[in-house]
Image (spheres, rainbow, N blue to C red):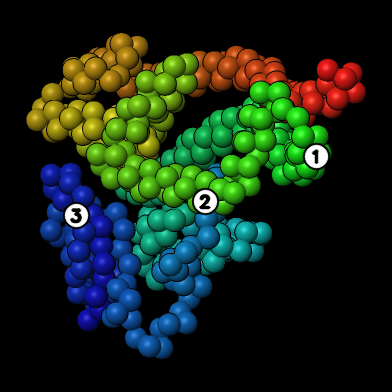
Amino acid sequence: MTEFRYTALDPQGREVSGTLQAEDRGGAVARLKAQGMYPMGLEMALASAPVGDAVASPGRSASMSLFPKRVSGADLSLFTRQLASLFNAGLNMARSLDTLIDHCENPTLKSVLSSVRQGVQGGSTLWESMGEHPHVFDELYVSLVRAGEASGQLGTVLERLADTLEVQEEQKSRIKSALAYPTLLIVAGFSAVIFILVFLVPRFSKIFKSLNRPLPVPTRILLNVQSFVSQNGLWLLVGIVAVVALIRMWGKTETGGFFIDRMRMKVPLLGSLIHKDAISRFCRTLATLVKGGVPILTSFEVAERAVGNKVIERAIVQVRDAVRGGESLAGPLRATSVFPGLVTNMIAVGEETGNLDEMLNRVADAYDAEVANRMRQLISLVEPVVIIVMGAIIGTIVLSMLIPVLELSTGV
């Protein structure tokens, strides 16, 4: 018997985890299903693995690595599109995976695909084999593949999943491109300020001290700032890093994450964009799952984790509990006061017409377009503001160094 660690959804839709004994992985999955659970992740416990199994298949080592390398979203979306094309062309899954492994250029993805192929050839379903690699195939991916295999529409589901991944990558690429120039300006400006404070100001400071005369107020302030930075710069940097690390650790807790996300949503100008971006992710994820045939309660479980916002996650839990009790979607969503009227009204129409996935996609498209437009407007304002601020800082520093020189030269 081998010991397996599992993560699953119980009959009430709650996430549970634990260990169980089984002859093999298929037996472990069968035991979970017999108990009415929905397996989300399953792996062999390290303590139960035979010594000779320490150098098992490449896929297993990738799955059990303490620090698994991540596969980029672009690589994953390309793989999904290619897999859908090969499968729809009539190739069986093992043959399709073999073809993609031969042409895969990403070593991490290639190792994972080799493990998935071994699982499929060993009798496991595709979603079960992919579920062993959560660092590559997340819950949304595995849930959709499972629904596609169960309904016999795997090719269609893979195409829809590829569309979703490509949209996400396009959004990320657009945001990165928009932020590239302002980021460059900020980095260049701060680098110039640090260079002046570290290399130029100390040299002028020696000259100023040799003058034996009172210095102007701006110059004294500049020298005090430079002295403080030179004496305490390292501790200041350590303190900043420590504060950021503590905030990140606190943000991973339920209370801290909820507080931080709530504050982020209240930030002027950016708060509404953060809120709408999270709503868009929820709507698009839920639409993809519903269209793929995933049960509504399971869809809410997966969408809850895809949002990335604790405030909206808590609201989704309330809605999921209400739906489990027999209510419709629109009413509980409206009662949370987190989802805007556009969302609740479109979902209500979708429930009445039977086109819930289409309405959710429309909401996601509308919010994506609005977020993209507002981002462009904000960035177009940020660029001149950054230039003016950094120019003012550098100009003030330079002027503070030149004033004593000018006074000396004019004899004032």
Q: Is residue 353 visible?
A: no
> Is residue 52 placed above or below 345 in the rendered structure?
below
Coordinates of residue 2 in the picture (x, y in percent)? 25, 78
Mark 1 in CB contact with mark 2 (< 8 angstroms):
no
Residue carrying label 3: 16
Of tags 2 and 3, the one toward the viewer is 2
Residue lying at the far bottom in this picture: please name it.
Answer: 52
Mark 3 in CB contact with mark 1 (< 8 angstroms):
no
Of label 1 and label 2, which has the lower sequence position?
A: 1
Residue lying at the far right in this picture: please name it.
Answer: 409
Residue carrying label 2: 235
| Residue 210 numbered mark, or none | 1
Residue at x 23% of width, y 32% of height? 314
Q: In this orientation, which residue lies closer to the viewer: 63 or 220?
A: 220
- Amino acid type for the residue under numbered disc 3: Val
Please tell me whether mark 1 sits on a helix, a strand or a loop. Answer: helix
Residue lying at the far front in this picture: please name it.
Answer: 212
Q: Quadrant of residue 342?
A: top left
- Amino acid type for the residue under numbered disc 1: Ser
Marks 1/2: CA–CA distance = 30 Å
Of label 2 and label 3, which has the lower sequence position?
A: 3
Q: Quadrant of residue 398?
A: top right
Q: In this orientation, which residue lies closer to the viewer: 246 or 103?
A: 246
